[in-house]
C-alpha cells in the first residue's frame, strides 16, 4: 500500500530553489531534478523503510547522479518530506536544520 506523501513548506521551498539553480546552470536541468525526485519518491511511497536512517526519525535517500538528498520521516500511512538538501553542506548545520523541522 502506498503511503501518502506530505511535503513540508520548507521542503517545497528548497525543491523550488534547487529547481531554479539547476535550470540556471543548464536549460532542462530543473526538469531533470524534478524527474529524479519523482523517480525516487515513487518507490519510497511503497517501501518507506528502504532508505537508511540518517538521524532518528529521519531517513535520507540520495538522488542518483546529483548531490541532493531527500530527507523524510515515516509516520503511520504517510511520509513527511522535510527537506531536499545539497549534501555538500556543512554536516553539522544540515543536521541541526533537518532535526529542527521534525513533524
Image: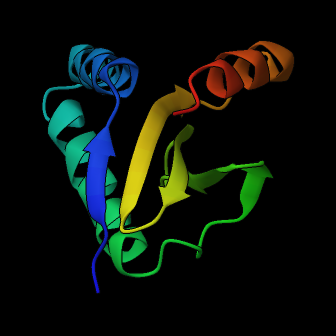
Vertical placement of residue 50 versus 15, above or below = below
Give the total number of marks visible in the rendering: 0
Left-right relation of 76 to 35: right
Q: Position of residue 6 (x, y in %)?
A: 29, 45
Q: Position of residue 10 (x, y in %)?
A: 38, 18
- The figure's colour scheme reads rainbow
Who's the residue at 31% across and 14% down the image?
Answer: 17
Vertical placement of residue 19 versus 65, above or below = above
Residue 89 appears in the figure: no
Vertical placement of residue 61 versus 103, above or below = below
Q: Nearer the viewer, residue 1 or 15?
A: 1
Q: Nearer the viewer, residue 19 or 96?
A: 96
Left-right relation of 4 to 48: left
Who's the residue at 53% across and 28% down the image?
Answer: 85
User: Residue 93 falls in which quadrant of the image?
Assistant: top right
Q: Nearer the viewer, residue 101 or 40?
A: 101
Q: Position of residue 102 (x, y in %)?
A: 58, 31
Q: Which quadrant does the N terminus fall into?
A: bottom left
Residue 68 appears in the figure: yes
Q: Residue furthest right?
A: 92
Q: Position of residue 36 (x, y in %)?
A: 31, 55
Amino acid at each position: 500500500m502506498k503511503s501518502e506523501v506530505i511535503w513540508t513548506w520548507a521542503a517545497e521551498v528548497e525543491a523550488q530553489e534547487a529547481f531554479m539553480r539547476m535550470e540556471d546552470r543548464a536549460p532542462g536541468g530543473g526538469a531533470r531534478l524534478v524527474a529524479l525526485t519523482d523517480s525516487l519518491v515513487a518507490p519510497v511511497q511503497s517501501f518507506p523503510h528502504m532508505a537508511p536512517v540518517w538521524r532518528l526519525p529521519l531517513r535520507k535517500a540520495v538522488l542518483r547522479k546529483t548531490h541532493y538528498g531527500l530527507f523524510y520521516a515515516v509516520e503511520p500511512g504517510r511520509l513527511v518530506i522535510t527537506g531536499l538538501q545539497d549534501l555538500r553542506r556543512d554536516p553539522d548545520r544540515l543536521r541541526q536544520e533537518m532535526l529542527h523541522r521534525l513533524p
